[in-house]
Image (tube, rainbow, N blue to C red):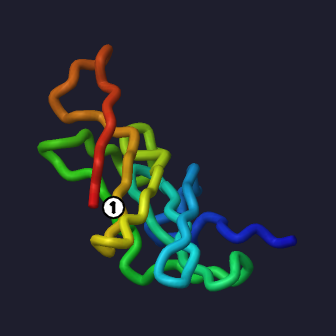
Amino acid sequence: MQPILTEGEPGAWDAHGVLTGTTVQARGLYWLFYGSGPRVGVMTSPDLIHWTKHPANPVLVPVEPYYQVAPSDVLGHNWRDPCIVWFPGEGVFEAYLCARQHDYDPVHTGGTCVAR
């Protein structure tokens, strides 16, 4: 069996490798949200076998001044490990991520982000 997700082509937003992710079933598709560097992208599949990367990737990125923003080739040290929840009544996904607040000191940098 071939892997469903590998790093992107040179120059792509996910060219430096892929990190952990989570899969959710919603709107008749499977949605795989995954990290690459300090960003999160998504792929969809109708059957868990054939996958398509979303054309608007990355769909979540850290934004200063709220979160620390690392260079694109740093694999997710401050915006990673998405846990996704689908809210069908509202028609939205909600993401819970490991993040670092911009103003934290080096000893106390951990935090959690919620994004819609």
Q: Residue at x 43, y 38 (%)?
A: 77
**Residue nearest the observer in this picture, 14 or 53:** 53
Q: Which residue, given by chain and number where applicable, does mark 1 sit on? A: 60
**Residue nearest the observer in this picture, 20 or 94:** 94
Of the 4 image quadrants, the one containing the C terminus is bottom left
Q: How many marks?
A: 1
Q: Residue at x 36, y 79 (%)?
A: 56
User: In the rendered image of this protein, does residue 51 appear above or below residue 102?
Assistant: below
Q: Amino acid at mark 1?
A: Leu
Of all residues, the one furthest to the right in this rendering is 1
Q: Residue at x 57, y 51 (%)?
A: 19
User: How many residues crowd mark 1 within 10 Å: few (<14), some (14–19), many (20+)?
Assistant: some
Q: Quadrant of residue 23?
A: bottom right
Provide residue 14's location: percent of width, then percent of height: 50, 64
User: In the rendered image of this protein, does residue 16 appear above or below residue 98?
Assistant: below
Q: Residue at x 23, y 34 (%)?
A: 101
Label 1 sits on a secondary structure element that is loop
Provide residue 32's location: percent of width, then percent of height: 55, 67
Q: Quadrant of residue 102?
A: top left
Provide residue 91's location: percent of width, then percent of height: 32, 75
